Image: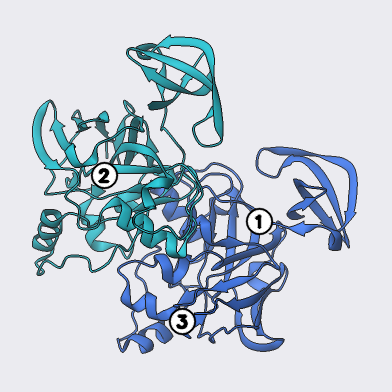
Chain colours: A blue, B cyan
Amino acid sequence: MRWVRYEADARVAYGLVEGEEVAEVRGDPFEGYERTAARRPLASVRLLVPVMPRTFYAAGLNYAEHVMAVANRRGEAPKLPKAADIGYRGVNGLIAHGETIVIPADASERVQYEAELVVVIGRKAKHLSEAEALSCVLGYTIGNDLSERSWQASDRTLWRAKCCDTFKPMGPWIETDFDLGAAQTIVRLNGEETLRFRTHRMVFGVAAFISRMSRYMTLYPGDVIWMGTEGTSENLKHGDTVEIEITGIGVLRNPVVRVNA
Amino acid sequence: MRWVRYEADARVAYGLVEGEEVAEVRGDPFEGYERTAARRPLASVRLLVPVMPRTFYAAGLNYAEHVMAVANRRGEAPKLPKAADIGYRGVNGLIAHGETIVIPADASERVQYEAELVVVIGRKAKHLSEAEALSCVLGYTIGNDLSERSWQASDRTLWRAKCCDTFKPMGPWIETDFDLGAAQTIVRLNGEETLRFRTHRMVFGVAAFISRMSRYMTLYPGDVIWMGTEGTSENLKHGDTVEIEITGIGVLRNPVVRVNA
């Protein structure tokens, strides 16, 4: 199933994508739902962020080549994370598929995309083994973990490097039937492919993160876990369009503007 | 005004504390409210976390002696933060006044309190100058930023050091009329005072944080900002009761248990 959250006729609803249509439901995929008779062309609705998370988790460094690239940038020896230690992002940064990434006037040129698989938690969970871990997952969506590299280097935390308003595109929907082992993540900048990697080749996988997190922390319906990115990224500039595809999920596309100084 | 969120008769409501009573309202302090005729003894209701934040911000190092204490613990030279760079905590960790702090079996002995002023945002805000910053604040409450020091030293992020379930007591209520300049923060462990400091003597004050954060990030009603702690803390052990008072707000008191290994 493919869950969208959308606005139509001045109302917000969840629906199921079926071909080129959306079938509206009463309720939501977390607390329960029933189908309604309402159907709309998918192209006619405004997609929203598929879930406003209760807590917004992010793995950060979780792909080997990206760890090397970051170390190179810092002039340090690359060091793979020793454990699945999760981090945090701000809900303020979330925007939907199609919405505009706005680069602040005082950001450097080095505002870069990061293409990430996003895990959406579907039910309350604690103390899950790795074998059980995926049982609390509703499905998967796509995230763009935009990062301003000069602030990432200068600041004590990642707040404005990663969490400026509009710096966290997420969508277009939540796919519940997803074959992670077969998936590829592809980035296109203005239509041209700039990055492609096997989505599952993480340092710590989805089950490893969920199991370790749930040892200490209750996971709640609607929590999201962003799984990190691979390789290196390009700078984004005014007028660009950045598109992240994860095969089997869909495409998250966002235009970019930069505020005039 | 003193806002409580509470459960009574199997319903959750906001109310105003008036003497030893709670006057129930319809609505909430963020979206609007009206008084009802219902009044209950304050002692008869179960207090809840006064707000479930949309984003849970935390200043971290923000008092000079605490910065020195942390540096001593690490064997490093103390370094005051150069800017008001905000961090994040997980909503899963929140518990109310009176609820029990549960120390996981595998935590070290060094689970310590941190007594913090908490700012509660009342209205959507962006691009506030320092002079305007406090206009978006609804009021203030108290937070206990519990920290497991061995995980804080070993892990790549603060996830389990700071965000284990029950590690973020917050309450007992939101005080809207608060004189920060006159306030003292006092910690009592099993009734004995272990720490006292002037609440306002922060490295970066409330207005400085809000103004800087709002330059890049929209603040939303219900967001909370934990302002950091002063000095050093004691270890908490099974059977302890830890109490944080901020004069002019109230007392946040929580019992401690440790899970058997």
Chain assignment, label 3: A
Q: Is residue B223 visible?
A: yes
Circles 1, 3 touching at the beta carbon (< 8 Å): no
Q: Residue at x 77, y 58 (%)?
A: A46
* Label 2 SS: loop
User: Pointer 3: residues within 10 angstroms few (<14), some, or many (20+)?
Assistant: many
Residue position for label 1: A139
Residue nearest the observer in this picture, B42 or B69: B42
B70 left or right of B158 in image: left
Q: Amino acid at mark 3?
A: His
Residue nearest the observer in this picture, B234 or A64: B234
Residue position for label 3: A66
Residue B59 drawn above or below residue A240: above
Chain assignment, label 1: A
| Quarter of the figure with the N terminus of chain B | top left
**Residue B160 horizontal/vertical position (percent):** 33, 52
Q: Is residue A86 visible?
A: no
Residue position for label 2: B146
Q: Amino acid at mark 1?
A: Gly
**Residue B39 horizontal/vertical position (percent):** 46, 10
Instruction: Report whether mark 1 lies on the same chain as mark 3.
Output: yes
Distance in Å between CA atoms under marks 2 and 3: 33 Å
Residue A235 drawn above or below residue B74: below
Instruction: Report whether mark 1 lies on the same chain as mark 2.
Output: no
